[in-house]
Image (cartoon, grey):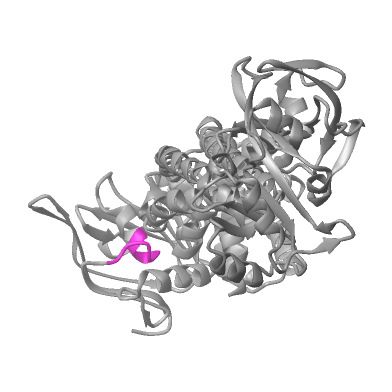
Amino acid sequence: MTTEHLFDLQKVAKRFVKGKDSITIFDNLDLSINKGDFVAIMGPSGSGKTTLLNLLGGVDQPTEGEISFDGQRIDKLSENLLAKWRANNVGYIFQFYNLMPMLNAARNVELPLLLTNLSSSERKQSVATALELVGLADRAKHMPSELSGGQQQRVAIARAVVSDPKLLLCDEPTGDLDRATADEILKMLQLLNREFGKTIIMVTHDPSAAKYANRTLHLDKGKFVDRELAA
Amino acid sequence: MFSFISQTWAVIVMNVRSLPRRLWMSLAMVLANAVVVAILLAFLAMDKGFEVTLKGAGSDDVALFLRGGSAAELNSGLGRDQVNLIATAPGIASNANGPIISAELYVIVDGIKRSTKTEANLPLRGLELTGIEMRNGFQLQEGRMFTPGTNELVVGQGVLREFEGFEVGNTLRIGKSEWRIVGSFSTGGNVFESELWADLNVIQSVYNRGSSVQTVRAKLSESGQLDAINAYVENEPQLNVDVQTEKAYFAGQSKNLSYMAWFGKIISAVMALGALSGALNTMYTSVADRAKEIATLRTLGFSTGSAFLGTLVEAMVLAMAGGLVGAVCAYLLFDGLNASTLGGSFTQVVFSFQMSGDLIAQGMKMALVIGFVSGVFPAWRAARMPVLLAFR
C-alpha cells in the first residue's frame, strides 16, 4: 500500500442473503485507485457497478476483505463514523440529482457545510464560490423545480464540491440528461479532476461518458477487467 | 455540537417546508389534536369555573353551623334554641347589637332555564341584613334591597342571566304567594349569585317553618380560628352542630363535583388515543414520503440523530399547531360561557367557564404528549432508513 493510492481494495467480497440463497456480487476483488484518477466503471446491469460505488463511498460495507482510503481502513467503521468520513472526504453526484425540492439552489449547496464548523458568512462565501464554479451564480435563489435537468445536476455538482472533498463519486451523472447537456456536465467533471485534483469515480452505461475518464474499468458478473491491463 | 445543531435545524426546516406535500394528512393530524385539546379545555374550564364559583363564595372569616351530620345546607335544620346557644359561643365577633350572626333558611323554588326552557331548582334564601353584610363583594346592581317583613326579594346576577322571568320589577308567584323582585345583586361571580334572597321571617312564615332555620353564619373574631368554637360545641350537650369555616364548606362542595374534570380527562384520553393512531399514520407516511431525502442527507454525512430529531420535531410542531388551534377555539367558544348545573344542595349553581393560562398549559401538554408519542417511532424508522435508498 502506498500513499499514491487513494483506494486499496483487497480480497473484497460482497454477498447478499435472500431467503435461503446467498447471492455473491463480488469475490476476492482487488483494486487500487490513485489519487487524482478519473475512473469510469462500466458494465451491464447487475454487474455490481453501483454496489462497488457504494462500497467505495462507505454507504455499504463488504462481507469480507479490506477497503482502505488514503491508508486508513474504512470497512470496519461504525455507521456514524462512516457518516463523518463521508462528510469529510466524499462528494456525491446522483443520476437524479437528489436535490431537496423545498430548498433553493444555494441552500442545497450549503447542506454539506452544515456538517462543518464554518460560520454562516463563511458558508455563504463557499456556496457563492461553488455556484460560480458551475456557472449558476445567478440561480442561487431558484428552487430545483425552476431549473432544467442540466442546471439541477450542476447544482448537485456544486453541492458535491462545496466542502472541498478529495473524492467525487458519480452514479450515472448524465443518465438523465440529453447529449449536449451530458457533455457539459462531463467537461465540468473533467475540469474538477484536472484543475482541482479531485479523484473522480463514475459509474456509467455510456461509452461516450467514459471517454472523459482517464481510466475505465469494465465490470461483468462481479469481476472487472481493467481495459488498459486487458489490452 | 455546533454541526449537530445546524444539521438538525436544517432537517427540521426541510421537514416543515415539505409539509405542503402532505397537506391533508398533516391537517388531519392538526385537527385531531385541536379537537382533543379543545374538549379537554372545555371540561377543565367548566370545572375551573365551577370551582371558582364555589370557592369564591367561602370566607375564612365566617363560621358555618349545620346540624350535626348534614352534608349540605338543604338537609340541615336548627331550632331557635340552637341558634341562641350558637350566639353565645366564644370566638364570635360582636358589634353594638351583639354577636354578629346570621340565621338563614334555605328553600327550593322552580325557575325556567333560558337555554333549555326546562324547570330547574333555584335556592331561595331567607336571611337578615347581617347575613348580607357577611357576603364579601356584595353589590346591589339594580333596584334596592328587600324591605324586611314584605314579600320582596332580590335576585342574583347568575339567576338573572340564566333563568327567565326574574327581571327587576317583575312579580313572581312562588307557591301560594306573590313576590315582587325589587333588586339584583352581584357577589363577584360566586355561588351566591345563583340565589334569590328574601327576609328570613317572611320565608319562615310562608313556608311554615316556625322559628327554625337551616344554617347559622357567624363572623369570627379571628380569621380561620375555630378552636374556641369547636371546644364550646363539644362541651355543650344541647348543641348538635357541625361547624367549619365557610371557605372549607364550599371547598368540600366543589370537591364533590370534581368528577367533571375527571370525566373530561377520561374522554380526552380516549379521544387522544384515536388522535394518536391518526398521528402515527401521518408521521409514518411523512417518513415514507421523505425516504429518499433522508437517505440523501445520510449519504452526505448527516447523522442518524438529526434524522431522528427532525422527524420528532415535525410531529411535535404539528401537534403543537393542533394544540394551539384547539386552545384558541376553546377560548373563543367557552371562556366566559354561562352555564348552570346541579350543586350540592340539589339546586342550580350558575357559573361561567373559566379559561386560564394554566389550563391552556395543560392542553398544550396533552398535545405535546400526543406529538411525542406519534413522532418517536416514525423518527426511529427515519433514523434507521437505509442510506442505499438515495441511489434508487
Image location of residue B197, percent across then percent down: 76, 34
Q: Nearer the viewer, residue B218 or B12?
A: B218
Q: Nearer the viewer, residue B140 or B367?
A: B140
Query: Residue A105 in the image: x percent, y percent?
Result: 66, 48
Give the vertical position of B217 relative to A14 (above or below).
Answer: above
Closest to the observer, A211 or B14: B14
Q: Nearer the viewer, residue B310 or B169?
A: B169
Image quadrant occupied by the N terminus of chain B: bottom right
Q: Position of residue A200 (x, y in %)?
A: 47, 62
**Secondary structure predominantly adopted by residues drawn in magenta:** loop
Q: Image check: B289 left or right of A20? A: right
Above or below: residue A225 compared with residue B24: below
Taking the image as drawn, is residue B354 in sight? no
Tell me where the magenta segment starts and ends, as one range: A54-61
Say whether residue B59 is magenta. no
Instruction: Determine the residue located farthest toward the right in the rendered image.
Output: B143
User: Which residue is outermost to the bottom?
Assistant: A2
Q: Residue at x 37, y 62 (%)?
A: A59
Q: Position of residue A56 (x, y in %)?
A: 37, 65
The quadrant in which residue A217 appears is bottom left
B122 is higher (above) or lower (below) than B312: above
- Name the residue rendered at 51%, 47% in the picture: B256
Please determine whether, in this image, residue B106 is positioned above or below residue A120. above
Q: Is residue A65 visible?
A: yes
Which corner quadrant holds the C terminus of chain B?
top left
